[in-house]
Amino acid sequence: MDSNELKHVITLLLENVERLQQIEPNAGTEARIWLARKALLDSEERYRGFAE
């Protein structure tokens, strides 16, 4: 699995977790969602154009 596929899988998992978070809110889960989104955005900025 390359990094783009991995990012896609993580994005799908985040979407699922956000749906669950709406049903049963949890502060710890909300914090982990925030960290995961930040990591994805940071990786996009850090490696933009790297493989082009």
Image: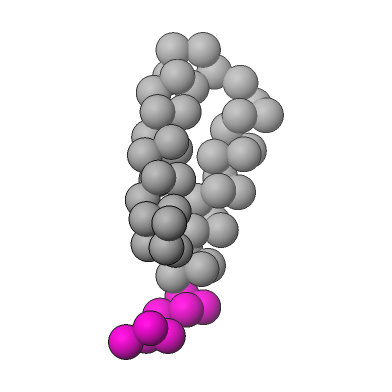
Instruction: Write down the region rendered in magenta.
Output: 45-52
Q: Residue 25: image x %, image y %?
A: 54, 18
Asked whether 2 or 29 is in front, the reply is: 2
In this view of the protein, can residue 47 be seen by the observer?
yes
In this view of the protein, can residue 7 be seen by the observer?
no
- Quadrant of the snapshot with the C terminus: bottom left
Q: Is residue 31 left or right of residue 24?
A: right
Which residue lies at the image location 61% right of the left edge and 29% below the top edge? 29
Which residue lies at the image location 44% right of the left edge and 38% below the top edge? 14
In the rendered image of this protein, does residue 46 appear above or below residue 35?
A: below
Asked whether 42 or 52 is in front, the reply is: 52
Q: Residue 6: image x %, image y %?
A: 44, 53
Q: Residue 16: image x %, image y %?
A: 40, 28
Magenta segment main secondary structure:
loop
- Please, which residue is most extreme toward the right here? 28
Q: What is the tally of numbered marks visible in this picture?
A: 0
- Quadrant of the snapshot with the N terminus: bottom left
Asked whether 6 or 1 is in front, the reply is: 1
Residue 33, picture quadrant: top right
In the rendered image of this protein, does residue 20 appear above or below residue 40?
A: above
- Please, which residue is most extreme toward the top here? 24
Q: Is residue 33 magenta?
A: no
Q: Residue 9: image x %, image y %?
A: 40, 45
Which residue lies at the image location 60% right of the left edge and 49% below the top edge? 35
Residue 23, picture quadrant: top left
In the rendered image of this protein, does residue 16 appear above or below residue 24?
A: below
Asked whether 44 or 50 is in front, the reply is: 50
In the rendered image of this protein, does residue 8 appear above or below residue 2?
A: above
Which residue lies at the image location 51% right of the left edge and 78% below the top edge? 46
Q: Is residue 51 magenta?
A: yes
- Please, which residue is most extreme toward the left here? 52
